[in-house]
Image (cartoon, rainbow, N blue to C red):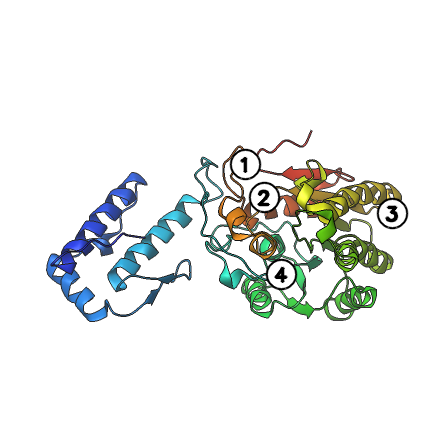
Amino acid sequence: MFKRKRCNHHSHYVHRSLRRTLRRLRHYHLSIPSLRLSRTHAGSETKQSHETQASCKSCKSRCRHDNIATSVHENLCIMKLQNNDQTQPQNPVDQYPAPPYPEQEQQMPGTEQEMNPKPDHGEETYKGSGKLNGRKALITGADSGIGKAVALAFAREGADVLISYLNEEEDAKETAELVRSAGRKAILMPGDISNEAHCQKLVDTMINELGGIDILVNNAAHQMEHESLQEISAEEWDYTFKTNLYAIFYLCKAAEPHLAPGSVVINTSSVNAYTPRPTLIPYTITKGAIQNFTATLAQLWGEKGIRVNCVAPGPIWTPLIPGSFPADKVKDFGKQTPLKRAGQPAEVAPVFVLLASAEASYISGATIQVTGGMPTI
């Protein structure tokens, strides 16, 4: 965070860093008394600890600073969390980190454990109000990203959650802990939703262990970037369609006999359904098809009292990004939006809550865009 300059007295460097930090804190009308350290204390503290690498408790990142500089980093993280209170009006341009991001790549499907900066799922900001009390939700791709933020929000609104994921165990366990910390039940179910038998097993588990299903969120997706059509194999084409589109059909068909009036299906589409990215051909086609599937099923199930809707996110900071794009494109991810940054999962989850709740009783067959201002008309 702070650029180290050569100095005969390390404590002088620490105090310069602290003074800059205190000025930033005052800018946000915050006071952190613990940062008002004496020159002697600062020097002795760094002498004891400057050879070790500390860990920030707020953002969980490894800090290349001594313990005092790490304390500064932690307080800046706390300041940021306070500044991201979703109940207060804020400037959305400055609300979250903006590009350039650190260059990074992962193997698909990707994990949050290796992302920098870490995505925000609303851990410190989302406040429930009982909108989904007693509901039972199945969420695919709930180990990380948008699915994780939706699972957290649903739990804090009173819903039990089945967390469907491919194989990202650590991310999924974190999601389960967030659900359980809200006082709700969480079931972990790894497996490949491109397989129809697994989709049936997910619904069966909902019935047997949670006693029913009344919210189905089809969120999981697969994408890979290719500069040429010749790079796309038939196997990848098939897997993208089966994961992104077939799985929705499998799950809706398996869930239908158990969905009572008032139940809800929410599918995740993409801004790519409106402005398709040429290097994501299989993905963009499936996202357009998902919107048509949503509009059609909403009509088919309308008389049954089952609402079906869609959310179309723009560039959202999830493991799918470093997992499917080269590092140089990850660096500038989201820069093309009018808000000049990537969105966070925490900024998408409230839309899912609205659509799942009774407050959206007359919304069906709709697609709600969460794109940071990217046009969809």
The residue identified by callout 3 is: 304
Residue occupying image coordinates x 51% and y 63%: 113
Instruction: Give the foreground label among 4 and 3.
Output: 4
N-term mark: 4 or 3:
4
Residue 276, image x, y percentages: 69, 39
Neighbours of disc 1 within 10 Å: few (<14), some (14-19), many (20+) = some
Dot 2 and dot 1 residues touching (CB under 8 Å): yes
Neighbours of disc 3 within 10 Å: few (<14), some (14-19), many (20+) = some
Question: Relative to residue 348, is residue 65 drawn left or right?
Answer: left
N-term mark: 1 or 3:
3
N-term mark: 2 or 4:
4
The residue identified by callout 2 is: 315
The residue identified by callout 4 is: 108
Instruction: Give the foreground label among 2 and 1.
Output: 1
Instruction: Give the foreground label among 1 and 3.
Output: 1
Label 2's element? loop
Q: Quadrant of residue 65?
A: bottom left
Instruction: Give the foreground label among 2 and 4.
Output: 4
Furthest residue toward front: 230
Q: Amino acid at mark 2?
A: Pro
Is 9 rendered above or below residue 337? below
Distance from label 4 to label 1 (Cα)? 24 Å
The residue identified by callout 1 is: 336
Is 17 rendered above or below residue 202? above
Q: Amino acid at mark 4?
A: Met
N-term mark: 3 or 2:
3
